[in-house]
Image (cartoon, rainbow, N blue to C red):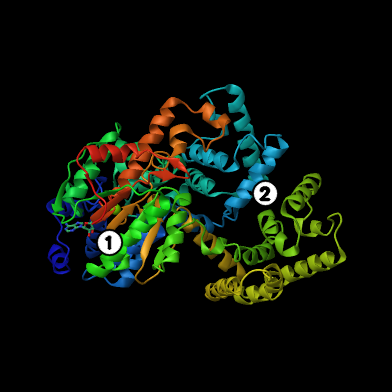
Amino acid sequence: YFRALEQAGMHLNRHQIAAVRHGKGPLLLLAGAGTGKTTTVVARVGYLLWQGVPAKRILLLTFTRKAAEEMQSRIARIPGIAPALARGVVAGTYHSIFLRLLQSRGYNQRILSSDAFRETIIKRILRQMKLQDSYPAETLLALFGYYKNNLMTYQDYGGQGQEELDQEIRTIWMAYEQFKTENHYIDFDDMMIEMRQLLLRDAALLQTLRDRFDFIFVDEYQDTTPTQDSIVKMIATPKNNLCVVGDDQQSIYGFRGAAASIIQDFAKEFPRAALIPLTINYRSTSQIVGLTDKVILHNRSRIAKVMEATVQGKRPPLFLRPRDSEDEAEQLIAIMARGVRELNYRWAHFVILYRTTAYCRAMLEKLTERHIPFVYHGGQESFYEQRTVKPVLDYLRLALRSDDLAAVEGILPSLYLNREDTMRYLEAQMAACPAMAPLGLLLTLPGLKEFQVKQIKERIDLIGRLAALTPRAAIRLVRQQYDKYMEADQRSTLTVHREAIREALDELETAAQKHRTVAAFLAFVEQMIAESKGRERQAEDGDAVQLMSIHKAKGLEFHTVFVIGLIEGVIPHSAALGADQCSDRISKTAGKSKVREAIEEECRICYVALTRAKRQLFISAPEMYRGKDTKVSRFVEDMIKRGGKKGRRY
Ligand code: ATP
Ligand code: MG
């Protein structure tokens, strides 16, 4: 097997080989960035397949769908492994794999996939409690998610500050949970909890899964939440052929409830686990490794690791100090253009990494202005959540379940009804008489114009006809009516925009073509939305500069990396420093240790960013940001003092 790998150009080192040949039982690969952890997992899966382990008995959990696809295609490139065999490996994100499982068990709760609708629910609760100005809905949802992912419920909230405020948050949270229960919704955080409870309840299912999977792998293990971890360990018991791989210093989803302590404690939990160190960095030049090693020294809670670089670099990492973010964009473009012109680089050699979406506006505009090809992996929403696509799907959703309130909300604009008012009305009516269907209730809205009544009737009639059609025909039918609305709505906007809508809906039809029933198509759609949570959009083919958040760059590598906005307030983010993103009420309940933890997480984010670079690294800290003087990020400043070279251009 290893000879075959070598022939294919994979020369594993002796530690990697030991990990690949590891027999049964738990295995931990805890090692720094770029030391070949993911590569080792790929090689080990290939080895198992070579040994005749059936592909479908291997479960491979990755952090993003793209990572799963990438690993499957790398497995397929191993000599002697047919592509179909590689595809047989059960690979994907926790969300996608467990949603599939829940659905196959006839689990038909509606998935609350729209963040906007979740926020609407919270806002409504806040209004009822006369607290609408006290809490940002988004922060509350993140807070609930954080607790739930740590296996806690609203009863557990508190004990961190003033009892009165704790009680308030508990009440809001309880109301949110109640709303979901009453309306048969679950959100993504619930999905993991449901899965865990299902396994605790349903011994037969648990046994099936235990029998089904002989080998389980988790990549990026440092970003596992306690709930996910407990599911995985339940399924892995008693064989415990569980291989977990990660780097505690790259744990950057703490805000969502991931806990680096899980990987740090794995060896304690499984005293017989094999621990194989990977110490050779194959990714970055020695100068880059030298710098990143020092950045991470900022953190106290870390497991020390040895790392040697193998690549001698030609160009040292450079530090840029542009005037402002416009100038920053100009300088980066000049550097990239020179690379393309003089060094034969492709645009795709470059990636620009930023901490917050808001920060990259100037960069986006300049790239557009200068006609530099780029791919922006922005936003979390999937194709199916786009503003143009979602309402069409909502019509389909209503065809299956006419009481889907989230879907009703989605179609309101196409009926020229005001969202807020209408939802408030529906809510009040349904509270009085729960048996009423929200669609029919629309007809009783006070003050409807005659044309509106006619339109609502038309749409109810339309919805009634959809379920019997193929999904494609159903979409077409909705479009016939929906196009009229879009056309009217977009009258003032550009034809290009209309063109984009048309393309999106054509695309939707194409996607639907593969499915026989509306129900099957919608199940697929929810699956896709689940997978898109917290992961990147598919990169386009072709030669283009990549632009993405640091969080999305995890696990990836690029020839030349620019990390922009390395200033105090951006990295570390102001939310970590002073909690400005939280309202006062929440920050009052957060202790000092939270701040320290938050800054450690910012440091790890910085570490993840810098360790993506293979050959060249630029870090940039503009002197001015949003009209104010800036301070260079504490992480970078330190680095410069400790020997990073200061330079302007290359
Ligand atoms: P991260 O912590 O960022 O996820 P990682 O430990 O998973 O990093 P990989 O992505 O597996 O690291 O590997 C980093 C780079 O090193 C890749 O380009 C990979 O092809 C290369 N690599 C891994 N092992 C070897 C090896 N034995 N010989 C040469 N190159 C290797
Ligand atoms: Mg990796």
Q: Position of residue 86 (x, y in %)?
A: 31, 67
Could you give the CA–CA distance between mark 1 and mark 2, rounded to whole angstroms?
Answer: 44 Å
Q: Position of residue 287 (x, y in %)?
A: 18, 49
* In contact (CB < 8 Å): disc 1 and disc 2: no
Quarter holding the N terminus is: bottom left
Instruction: Give the mark nearer the N terminus: 1 vs 2.
Output: 1
Badge 2: residue crowd in 10 Å (few <14, some 14–19, many ≥20): some
Residue appearing at x 28%, y 34% in the figure: 298
Inspect this view and state whether residue 63 appears: no
Residue appearing at x 53%, y 58% in the figure: 103
Q: Is residue 544 above or below residue 152?
A: below
Q: Which residue is mark 1?
A: 53
Q: Is residue 526 above or below residue 467?
A: above
Q: Which mark is residue 610?
A: none
Q: Is residue 360 above or below residue 169?
A: below
Q: Quadrant of ligand 1?
A: bottom left
Q: Position of residue 370 (x, y in %)?
A: 41, 66
Q: Nearer the viewer, mark 1 or mark 2?
A: 2
- Secondary structure under tag 1 reads loop
Q: Position of residue 18 (x, y in %)?
A: 16, 51
**Amino acid type, residue under disc 2 in the picture:** Asn
Q: Which residue is mark 2?
A: 183
Quarter holding the C terminus is: bottom left
**Amino acid type, residue under disc 1 in the picture:** Val
- Secondary structure under tag 2 reads loop
Residue 414 placement, left or right of 573: right
Residue 339 placement, left or right of 16: right
Residue appearing at x 74%, y 71% in the figure: 462
Relative to the observer, which residue lies in front, 9 or 242? Answer: 9
Q: Is residue 57 above or below residue 476?
A: above
Residue appearing at x 76%, y 66% in the figure: 460
Inspect this view and state whether residue 66 appears: yes
